[in-house]
Image (cartoon, rainbow, N blue to C red):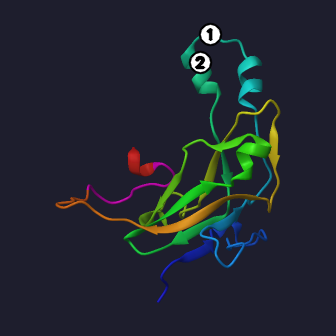
Amino acid sequence: MKKRGFERVTSFEKKEINLPVRATHHAAGYDFEAAEDVVIPSIWKQLFSRTIRSDQAVEKKIKPVLVPTGIKAYMSEDEFLQLANRSSNPLKRFLVLSNGVGVIDSDYYNNDANEGHIMFQFTNFGLRDVTIKKGERIGQGIFLPFLKADHDESIGERTGGFGSSNE
């Protein structure tokens, strides 16, 4: 019986990507790699290269970039996978996780919309664009248990993929 782990999503099965692994015996997180080359544009470059008409127009132009991993995770229903940035990303590359911390729920696995494909969402606050290369470590995933409140009532079933639980 499988408890928790990682698999490749179908569309990446033949693209030579590695399943996440822990770097050391005592590491809490599993290192995720980029499944393809991705450019994360500088927010400053985006901001100053456009005519600013309103705050709303700026917000529509500056968006996080999703970096695919080609990986999905399975786990018990009382667990989640926390996605965290690599500690060197902000310091050396000016990359931050746009959502602070990612949360992959157990019912995200094999959902109908995207098969549970895990992606990291980055914003580049540096002055230059950053290119993430395929195979480069981009973040970590940590399996964690969670608790439910007394009288917890489920709202329903997952109906989509990325960001679907808040729609």
Badge 2: few (under 14), some or many (20 or more) residues near its Cα, within 10 Å?
few
- Left or right: where 158 falls relative to 20: left
- Left or right: where 64 falls relative to 88: left
Amino acid at dot 1: Arg
Magenta residues (range) = 155-163
Badge 1: few (under 14), some or many (20 or more) residues near its Cα, within 10 Å?
few
Instruction: Answer above or below: position of 61 versus 26.
Output: above
The quadrant holding residue 154 is bottom left
Q: Residue at x 59, y 18 (%)?
A: 57
In the displayed orientation, state which residue is furthest to the left: 151
- Left or right: where 144 falls relative to 119: left
Question: In terms of depth relative to the viewer, which is nearer, 132 or 68?
Answer: 132
Tell me if residue 158 is in the magenta stretch: yes
Q: Position of residue 130 (x, y in %)?
A: 81, 41
Q: Are marks 2 and 1 in contact (CB under 8 Å)?
A: yes
The quadrant holding residue 71 is bottom right
Q: Is residue 166 visible?
A: yes
Question: In terms of depth relative to the viewer, which is nearer, 90 or 82?
Answer: 90
In the displayed orientation, state which residue is furthest to the top: 53
Q: Residue at x 60, y 55 (%)?
A: 84
- Give the CA separation, mark 2 to mark 1: 6 Å
Q: Which residue is mark 2?
A: 57
Q: Position of residue 120 (x, y in %)?
A: 63, 52
Q: Position of residue 131 (x, y in %)?
A: 82, 45
Tell me if residue 166 is in the magenta stretch: no
Q: Residue at x 19, y 61 (%)?
A: 150
Task: Label 1: state its secondary structure.
Answer: loop
Q: Which residue is mark 1?
A: 53
Amino acid at dot 2: Ala
